[in-house]
């Protein structure tokens, strides 16, 4: 019999279980990182020394009352604001302009408010027109595309419903669905507990957890009270 009955392990073989190399392979690289992230405004620090690390498909909570810098921090993570100091990377991108290509934001008050007078269909096709410059001519086709746009967030709405008639949960999820039309790797949402009771807040967090799994997107969401996200979020930043 020729050949070696006990060949040496080659570089292509998996490392032994429990070895440092195996642990490294099991730990995915983070999609979002922040180190010493700080923003200073005319009246002082808006937020300061924020560190975080979130893997792809993760769900993070940023909690804080109004005035704690929560919205500014979320916009910084999405590449819409520049920090005074510190570093943020998303999918390996560090420049704000390139982060914007992989990060999208849901409805954020004072930034990209949904128009109460527009219907669900009109919002979907306004976003679609901005992306592709095309509008389907047949109403039936439009309804199909609206349903397809809402499906990732688990919404089933009458396409003709004015946005102003939507409840808080459906409005938040519509904003998320519109953001997902840009096919981001990071979805940033703010004020997701606004206008909702505690049990509805829990349902909202459950919807976001399911969304990370259904759409394979990483989510950072802001709220006042993080308690309803207990056991669902991978990371919490308290401001």
Image (tube, rainbow, N blue to C red):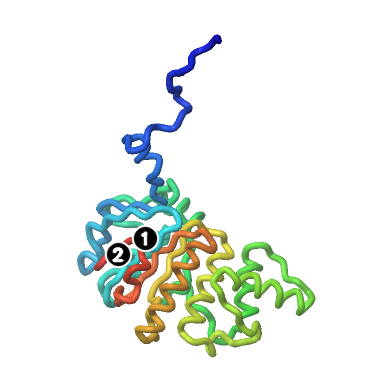
Residue 210 percent across, percent down from the top left: 48, 68
* Extreme residue toward the front, this view: 1
Q: In 3D space, how far apart are the residues under numbered discs 1 and 2 (Cα atoms)?
A: 17 Å
Disc 1, disc 2: CB below 8 Å? no
Which of the marked residues, 1 or 2, is nearer the chain's N terminus? Answer: 1
Using a 10 Å C-alpha cutoff, classify the residue at mark 1 as few (fewer than 14 neighbours), some (14 to 19) or many (20 or more).
Answer: many
Q: Dot 1 corresponds to which residue? A: 76
Q: Quadrant of residue 151?
A: bottom right
For the residue pair 44 and 139, the one nearer the viewer reads as: 139
Identify which residue is drawn at 44% across, 24% down.
Answer: 11
Identify which residue is drawn at 50% across, 75% down.
Answer: 173
**Of marks 1 and 2, the one in the foreground:** 2
| SS under mark 1 | helix
Q: Quadrant of the N terminus?
A: top right
Q: Is residue 48 above or below residue 114?
A: above
For the residue pair 172 and 133, the one nearer the viewer reads as: 172
Q: Is residue 201 above or below residue 133?
A: below
Q: Dot 2 corresponds to which residue? A: 236
Residue 68 percent across, percent down from the top left: 25, 71
Q: Quadrant of residue 129?
A: bottom right
For the residue pair 219 and 154, the one nearer the viewer reads as: 154
* Extreme residue toward the left, this view: 44
Identify which residue is drawn at 57% across, 62% down.
Answer: 182
Residue 116 percent across, percent down from the top left: 53, 85
Q: Quadrant of the C terminus?
A: bottom left
| SS under mark 2 | strand
* Extreme residue toward the bottom, this view: 165
Identify which residue is drawn at 43% across, 63% down.
Answer: 219
Q: Is residue 104 above or below residue 35?
A: below
């Amino acid at each position: 019999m020729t050949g070696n009955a006990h060949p040496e392990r080659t570089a292509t073989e998996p490392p032994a279980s429990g070895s440092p190399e195996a642990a490294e392979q099991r730990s995915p690289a983070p999609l979002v990182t922040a180190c010493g992230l700080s923003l200073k405004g005319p009246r002082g620090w808006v937020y300061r020394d924020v560190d975080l690390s979130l893997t792809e498909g993760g769900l993070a909570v940023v909690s804080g009352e109004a005035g704690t810098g929560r919205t500014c921090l979320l916009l910084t993570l999405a590449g819409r604001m520049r920090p005074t100091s510190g570093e943020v990377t998303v999918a390996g991108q560090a420049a704000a302009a390139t982060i914007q290509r992989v990060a999208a934001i849901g409805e954020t008050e004072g930034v990209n408010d949904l128009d109460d007078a527009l219907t669900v269909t009109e919002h979907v096709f306004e976003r679609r027109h901005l992306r592709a410059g095309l509008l389907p001519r047949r109403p039936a086709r439009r309804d199909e595309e609206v349903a397809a746009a809402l499906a990732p967030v688990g919404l089933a709405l009458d396409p003709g419903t004015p946005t102003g008639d939507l409840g808080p949960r459906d409005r938040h999820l519509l904003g998320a669905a519109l953001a997902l039309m840009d096919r981001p790797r990071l979805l940033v949402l703010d004020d997701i507990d606004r206008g909702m009771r505690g049990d509805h807040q829990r349902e909202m967090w459950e919807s976001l957890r399911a969304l990370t799994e259904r759409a394979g997107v990483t989510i950072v969401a802001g709220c006042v009270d993080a308690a309803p996200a207990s056991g669902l979020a991978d990371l919490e930043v308290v401001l």
